[in-house]
């Protein structure tokens, strides 16, 4: 943004002409987010992620979180989900949620070997 544009918008804001300032539709929060409307779903979703990720062998995907949120939404609202409807929160939105919640994406290095790769010593019989 140039200095002239910044000065123009600062002047509009300082004069208190909120209509003109908000009609530009730049930045800021224009509507409530999903979690502003359903804060209990956010709490349940965070607890779900912690529960799943605290298990010994974790196969967690953002799609699992999206499915969980979808189920909770329909339970909470009492609406019956129609066949073919998309998820309430997309997988991509759930990935962003995880990042916003400061989730760490690391490989599980606690396994001794990759599944399917058996050690010969363990599999040989004498």
Image (tube, grey):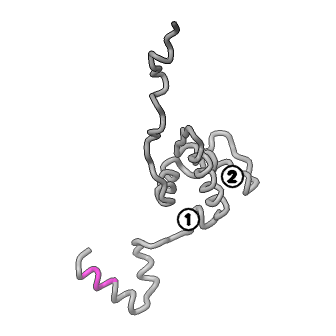
Residue 9 spot, x, y in % from top left: 34, 83
Residue 80 spot, x, y in % from top left: 74, 48
Judged left or right of residue 47, residue 26 is left
Please give the label number shown on residue 33: 1
Residue 44 spot, x, y in % from top left: 65, 56
Q: Nearer the viewer, residue 31 or 68?
A: 68
Q: Nearer the viewer, residue 55 or 70?
A: 55
How far is mark 2 from mark 1, CA to CA?
Answer: 17 Å
Which of label 2 and label 1 is nearer to you?
2
Residue 26 spot, x, y in % from top left: 39, 72
To which residue does mark 2 refer? Answer: 72
The disc, 2 or 1, on the residue closer to the chain's N-terminal end is: 1
Q: Looking at the image, do the residues carrying marks 2 and 1 touch, with CB atoms under 8 Å apart?
A: no
Asked where in the image residue 82 lies, by quadrant, the reply is top right
Q: Residue furthest left?
A: 3
Magenta-colored span: 4-9
Judged left or right of residue 8, residue 56 is right
Identify which residue is drawn at 63% across, 60% down: 43
| Magenta portion: prevailing SS class | helix
Asked where in the image residue 109 lies, by quadrant, the reply is top left
8 in magenta: yes
Q: Is residue 21 above or below residue 67?
A: below
Q: Nearer the viewer, residue 43 or 71?
A: 43
Asked where in the image residue 119 lies, by quadrant, the reply is top left
């Amino acid at each position: 943004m140039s200095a002239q544009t910044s000065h123009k918008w600062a002047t509009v804001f300082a004069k208190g002409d909120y209509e003109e300032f908000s009609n530009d539709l730049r930045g800021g929060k224009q509507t409530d987010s999903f979690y502003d409307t359903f804060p209990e779903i956010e709490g349940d979703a965070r607890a779900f992620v912690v529960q799943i990720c605290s298990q010994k062998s974790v196969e967690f995907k953002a799609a699992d979180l999206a499915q969980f949120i979808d189920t909770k939404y329909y339970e909470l609202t009492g609406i019956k989900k129609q066949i073919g409807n998309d998820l309430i929160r997309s997988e991509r939105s759930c990935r962003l949620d995880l990042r916003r919640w400061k989730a760490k994406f690391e490989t599980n290095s606690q396994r001794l070997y990759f599944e399917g790769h058996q050690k010969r010593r363990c599999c040989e019989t004498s």
